[in-house]
Image: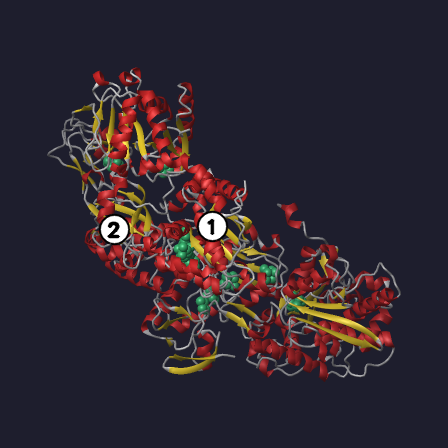
Amino acid sequence: MDKIKLTIDNKEVEVAKGTTILDAAKQIGVHIPTLCHMKLHDMGIENKPGGCRVCVVEVEGRRNLAPACVTEAAAGMNINTHSIRVINARRTVTELIISDHPFECLTCAKSGECELQDLAHQMGIREIHFEGEKSVYREDTSPAIIRDMDKCIMCRRCEMMCNEVQTVGVLSAINRGFYAVVSPPFEQNLDHSVCTYCGQCVAVCPTGALTEVDHTPAVIRALSDPSKTVVVQTAPAVRAALGEEFGFEPGTLVTGKMVAALRRLGFNYVFDTDFAADLTIMEEGTEMLDRLSRHLNGDKTVKLPILTSCCPAWVKFFEHQFPDMKDIPSSAKSPQQMFGAIAKSYFAEKQNINRKDLVVVSVMPCLAKKYESSRDEFAVDGNPDVDFAISTRELAALIKLANIEFKALPEEDFDHPLGESTGAGVIFGTTGGVIEAAVRTAYELHTKKPLPKLNFDELRGMEGVREATIDFDGLPIRIGIAHGLGNARKLLEDIRSGKSHFHAIEIMSCPGGCIGGGGQPYHHGNSDILIKRQKAIYQEDSMKTLRKSHENPYIVKLYEEFLGHPMSDKAHHLLHTSYFDRSKHFEQED
Amino acid sequence: MKVKSLADLKKIKAEVQGKIKLREQGENADKIVQIKVAMATCGIASGAKEIMSYMIDELDFRGVDAIVSQTGCMGYCYAEPTIEVIVPGQSPVVYGFVNKEKAKEIIEKHIVKGELVDGIIPVTFKTIDE
Amino acid sequence: MAENKMHILVCGGTGCRASQSEQIVNNLKAELESQNLENDVRVLTTGCFGFCEKGPVVKVVPDNTFYTEVKPSDAIDIVNEHIVKGRPLQRLLYKNPKNNYKVTNTASIDFYKKQVRIALRNCGFVDPENIDEYIGRDGYEALGKCLSDYSPSEVIDIIKKSGLRGRGGGGFPTGLKWEITSKEKNDQKYVVCNADEGDPGAFMDRSILEGDPHSVIEAMAICGYCIGANKGLVYIRAEYPLAINRLKIALSQASEYGLLGNDIMGTGFDFDIEIRYGAGAFVCGEETALIHSMEGSRGEPTFKPPFPSVSGYLGKPTNVNNVETFANVPVIINKGAEWFSSIGSENSKGTKVFALAGKVNNVGLIEVPMGITLREVIFDIGGGIRNGKKFKAVQTGGPSGGCLTEKDLDIPIDYDNLIKAGSMMGSGGMIVMDEDDCMVSIAKFYLEFTLDESCGKCTPCRIGNKRLHEILDKITKGKGTEQDLERLKLLSNVIKDTSLCGLGQTSPNPVLSTLLNFEDEYLAHVREGKCPAGQCKDLLKYEIDPDLCTGCTLCYRNCPVGAISGEKKSVHYIDQSICIKCGVCFQKCKFKAISIV
Ligand SMILES: Cc1cc2nc3c(=O)[nH]c(=O)nc-3n(C[C@H](O)[C@H](O)[C@H](O)COP(=O)(O)O)c2cc1C
Ligand code: SF4
Ligand code: SF4
Ligand code: SF4
Ligand code: SF4
Ligand code: SF4
Ligand code: SF4
Ligand code: FES
Ligand code: FES
């Protein structure tokens, strides 16, 4: 690759051609402040509208200042990243942004994690010299996400995520000049759009303009109601990220401390979504084998590939965008909803609690789960299977609120019966994990032989679309994996056009899978964090004694005592669902 | 109609140029000969219209570039039809009692060769433009 | 047989059509017919003459008589007087505002005297809806020559040698741009004509497309030949229905003649043109925004590089030129690079079309050689300042330009000189201001435009211009401070220095140049609370001079808010706390007893 030499702050640096000034400066340890720019470099995701102009630097011989994040370094450039002209411009630009921003840090969900706040601090802003009109917008609350566009700084990261990465196309800039803002089409609310609630916009928003709907007050209310039994389930990806909120290195597993904290918070039972993940594998794996063997026997009514269905944002995505294919995904509910259904039937009966007095709280890396739990079909007589879904971040906030010293907590174990899980359930938290878990079970059920090895490295990784062929004892099973809805779209289009050759496909909406979910601690554009979380997930799997869902003794017991067998009528009733065509949803309403 | 070559295009150009020649002449009025035919009631009565048509055809026939236009009564009703001939760089000349023969002579001698012809009305003429 | 003896050209430009020029055509035709003159006299509709303010314009050739402000009902008189009796119709002749003399001949009108029409050569001359007329004017000959006699690089050389620079604002050398695009290797390239024309008051591009659409089509094909593109796109604002219509007619005639389409003139070169409609935002004229808009995305600029020449429409190499730039091209090919470069100044060749407006006697569209002075434009072509007032400033370059003053009147107008003087060429807006104009309000006016047209993508333009405007507003309301002037300067410079696209990079120019040239006026606003030009309503005060007031009660009876009190025949008094500064009393008072202070 061609190399070029240039000078930054009197230091010479050699970089590859095509490197931006921002990256070139980084190489020699010169930090240039940025705001709109964001790069998840391992995932090929980059937002660089060059809009905020915070990163401007002085390039000798250039008429005006150059935005470092989009300007390519050129040979012989002489760059000053902090001349008086630059400092003055950068500070004025920051002041301008703040001059159109509400001063609400005290009550803002983003406070402490806010990149604008950090920038103001770094720029040493003490006074705003330009006062004037501020943008005011109607607040938009959906089942999962709150849009408070007064706080939007037009970095366009959400737009890039929603359009380019997720290809959902809900968010885009509208209006002009001072009144330009990012909005769903026709300035409708999010819940009037095809939004999947994947939460990726929230995950990247530098300010408090996009945040999750806060369920913590409701959880506190439930916990303080003596007439309620409150159980909590924690999704696999939570334990791999929660520690970050308490100063642990990214990728530190905090499963035991998390359980301890939940007990201290007053939950009556601390259960694990991983248990439900094992259950999902039983149902989904069986369904997969069933479809597969019927297909192999020449049954033309069977459609392949079978698609996973454990990600609610993905479910909503295909309901809007590919309704013609709604019979392809597995009918198995997501682990969250399987857990809720079992908790409010099997467990409630066991404990002799009326389902109305049992409150199921889930802790999720995910914002779509908030929406999922509110779907009508997941309630009995108006009583939802899952009452509240809080994010990893909300759990951290609760722990901090309760003054629990997280780091000092002992490691504790989940409660029984719904707290036991296998390694297969754990790896649900990362891209490739669901299908690996399914393969582990399906293989043994199909071949009736034990797996020679449990780690399927060919299914792991971070590339957006992956494929592998697994040998089911002579039967080659072709498997596809996509994370990020844009990647999912590619596979779906192949299926639609008949080009797909897969037997099974796993789809996760979030880049990296649930470890990169919209409810996780903010990664602030650092994709190393996601990779470390993924490692932690596989680490937890490898530490487990049981690593195949069908070996989970409590799952076996659940079938014996309650469900019968996978895909039984009861299992169907409780653990499976059906999908809706939402493609015309909004045209009808408007 | 399809233009199949540059030569085709030039053919069309030659055909259609006549349609706009008048305007191009108008634009370059100061560089070509102008003939103004007095066309007030008195002039029309005395046959100015025919003279005008005759001159246009005759000039066209000889391929002489000149603007033939009409003007109001020049005030020499006794000598109608009158025409004014303006050769670039020379002062205007007014002829009286112009009939076809006279017109032909004016074209042949005055306009083509630059020799004055009999029948000039001695005037110092002013146009409105000045 | 000889052609018609006379032609009556009726302007069919947007301006004149708005005042019923179509009806004039119909009436003329009907009248000629009733006099059996339809074979002698041809009536045709042309494009804009540039003199729209005095429209509808009618011209009779070959005698070049120029009628202005013609009404449909005048058609009968034109035929009877001019055509039949041969006398110019006195009452419709243009009156020289300097001496009130009537002028018959177009060539003698000040407005046209110093003009050199290259880009506008056919506007007001040919019938734009008839391709034959264009061909008669050497139309498509340049394309034919290029395709059969020259290689693409030879044509590019001609354009380079001619010194033609982009007329869309930036002034980038056109030949060089073509060369860059031609050198890109790609199986698909595009030629884009920028007809977005968002500069308020500028309408040269519209006029060219209305009056001479073929010249743009021909030039685009030539460009396509040079850069290796066979697809052209015209991005035109949807608010230009007439231009769109004429362009459509021209495109279909050109295709019919085989001058567009496959194997043009038997040379194997294919070229086609499509029309794309613009949303009408100023910023969509910026080339990257324009391309995004054509692609169906939000019309918003993106950082350059990459330039469109490298990665443009659909990521393909795309050559974007302005309408007026294109309109020059066929003439350059036909008459040669030397001819073109003999016109104009050292570094700016040829002519530029300006939309002259404001407080001059003659306003309209003019085409002048580069290097002409502002003085010649304003005082000769423009006929000087209206109503004998004093010249104060001229804004060139539209909202991106700056105000130039008396001291700049003698600099030769070209790209570089205007920038040196603190303004710019822009797309050719030129607004003249007189002593009655308040320069703070002028700066505010331009900024209002920018505010509306900014795309909002980058901070300095989105919020910075808003703040600038707020400060200016404060000053015009008498609430500004001297600190605000400092703030204006600081903010203006940062906005220029940090904005993403040309809009923001130039939007503070009106503020900076008025601050520079008219600081005293700003100071009067902030220090004394006075608007020297008497334009800022909030700073005005109407007062009655007790010595002159006769107590006639006229003002009292006319004041809409009852701010005036006083008995009959005794001195009246204005209550300033009630007065809304409508100025009615001032106009009504017969004794000049009321004054503005
Ligand atoms: C805010 C802004 C608005 C512009 N508007 C126009 C326009 O209306 N028409 C135009 O031709 N060029 C416009 N331009 C310039 C174009 O970006 C581009 O430079 C031009 O079309 C190139 O053509 P030229 O080289 O022939 O001038 C604008 C530029 C900016 C920054
Ligand atoms: S978004 Fe950031 S700066 Fe704005 S109120 Fe919230 S914490 Fe404060
Ligand atoms: S939640 Fe996902 S789909 Fe919805 S707006 Fe945000 S990014 Fe788009
Ligand atoms: S909502 Fe957030 S992510 Fe989206 S543009 Fe505004 S500040 Fe950026
Ligand atoms: S990938 Fe996981 S975190 Fe993301 S939307 Fe799907 S279930 Fe939620
Ligand atoms: S300078 Fe203005 S118009 Fe240009 S990109 Fe920035 S906000 Fe948009
Ligand atoms: S300016 Fe208008 S409102 Fe004021 S006193 Fe005169 S008439 Fe009344
Ligand atoms: S970080 Fe570079 S423009 Fe925003
Ligand atoms: S529109 Fe008629 S002169 Fe311009």
Left or right of residue C294, residue A433 in this image:
right
Disc 1 under 8 Å from ligand 1? The reply is no
Left or right of residue C551, residue A168 in this image:
right
Quadrant housing the N terminus of chain C: top left
Amino acid at circle 1: Gly
Q: Quadrant of residue A500?
A: bottom right
Do the residues at discs 2 and 1 belong to one chain? yes
Left or right of residue A239, residue B91 in this image:
left
Place of residue A313 in the rendered image (x, y in percent of width and height, measured from the top left): 66, 62
Amino acid at circle 2: Ile
What is the chain letter for disc 2? C
Q: Is residue A372 above or below residue A17?
A: above
Pick whichever, A69 or C362, lies toward us.
Answer: C362
Place of residue A211 in the rendered image (x, y in percent of width and height, measured from the top left): 55, 63
Quote the CA–CA distance across marks 2 and 1: 34 Å
Q: Which residue is mark 1?
A: C144
Q: Residue furthest left?
A: C547
Left or right of residue A412, residue B73 in this image:
left
